[in-house]
Image: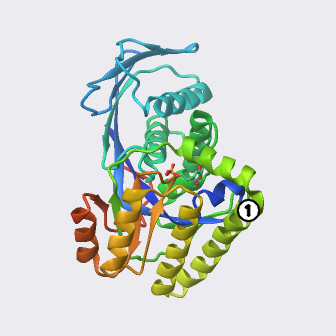
Amino acid sequence: MITTTAPGKVYLFGEHAVVYNQPAMASAINKRIKIELEERSDKEILIHPNDLSFKEISFEYSEDGFKLKNKLKRSFPSLEYIKTAIDLIKREIRDNSGFEINITSELPPAGGLGSSAALTVSLIAALNKFYGLNFDKREIANKSYKIEKEVQGGASPCDTFTSAMGGITKVIPGETLTKKEKMDLPIVVGSTRQESSTSKLVKKVKKLKIENSEIIDPLIDDIGKITLKGEKALENRKLRKVGQLMDINQGILDALNVSNLKLSELIYSTRKVGAWGSKLTGAGGGGCMVALGDRKEEIKNAIKVRDGEVIADQITAKGVEVR
Ligand code: PMV
């Protein structure tokens, strides 16, 4: 059996602006998706998503693509990522052997923590090992990005790169993807327990930007400036400065109308108990927030009292791992 895991991520700075070629910074977090892959003697591909409503999903794969063997009452949201990943690899190596995949996730779906990226990275790493393809982490990140882009019709490379490499990463679309020196950050990630749609929110910002470009364009540029200033503050370990910049970033995300009441409640209540900075992470409109500060217990409590769920409390240097 092959076992792989890959982490989720939070945006420290730059979501939404990254869509308009501004830099962004993200960090991998200590919650992961696990894939267990085992060979079968027939050609069947069996997926155990461990979602209560889907015990298993079964396919036969041929050069024409996938043939679903059991009926699905509703769509399984992550299925497109899984199918596209398997298809990409199988087409490259022209193989139709069967296997079973077991998925276990510690990440809430559609919550701004890059769960689809972690799933894709983990699966590509498992197939890489299964077929002995010798992709390195960067190649796994590139393949996974291609899959995310195909399934979503557009994506930034931030999620897949951060999940594959681990640690804190900086992304400038079309230019550079870099992993920063190993560093630690005291964070707490809280969920509103509300799912949100990244593509809808990206479209919402686009509309706002088209209708008010003279106002919105400078705000998008400002987010880019926040990222660059935040990068320096991080490098100099000026964590209170990092927090201040996260708060300014949140103010602009609010102006872009991607925050909401529940996010604001969690963000303001964590600031009230001493977080140095607090902002939403990812697309917004629900999903998760991230607070920076050393009073972790107080911050966690503030999230719970407001009916949020504490998801993660550490960043991680560990990217994708294979056992
Ligand atoms: O919510 P997530 O984790 O899918 O992050 C979305 C980040 C955006 O900048 C809004 C979109 C993107 O593809 O970069």
* Residue placed most toward the observer, 118 or 10: 10
69 above or below 288? above
- Residue at image position (45%, 21%) is 97
- The residue pinned by badge 1 equals 217
Q: Is residue 201 above or below residue 248?
A: above
In-image side of 86 versus 276 (left or right): right
Q: Residue at position x 63%, y 51% from top?
A: 205
Please name the amino acid that badge 1 sits on. Asp
Q: 312 or 36: which is nearer to us?
A: 312
Is the CB–ligand 1 distance for label 1 below 8 Å? no
How far across and how far down the image is residue 154, in percent? Answer: 64, 41
Residue 74 at what x, y percent from top left?
37, 21
In the foreground, 97 or 138:
138
Does the image show residue 271?
yes
In the drawing, does residue 237 fall left or right of residue 191?
Answer: right
Image quarter where the N terminus lies is top left
Query: Residue 221: x and y, percent?
Result: 71, 67
Q: Nearer the viewer, residue 36 or 214?
A: 214
**Residue 39 drawn at (x, y percent):** 36, 27
Q: Residue at x 53, y 63 (%)?
A: 254
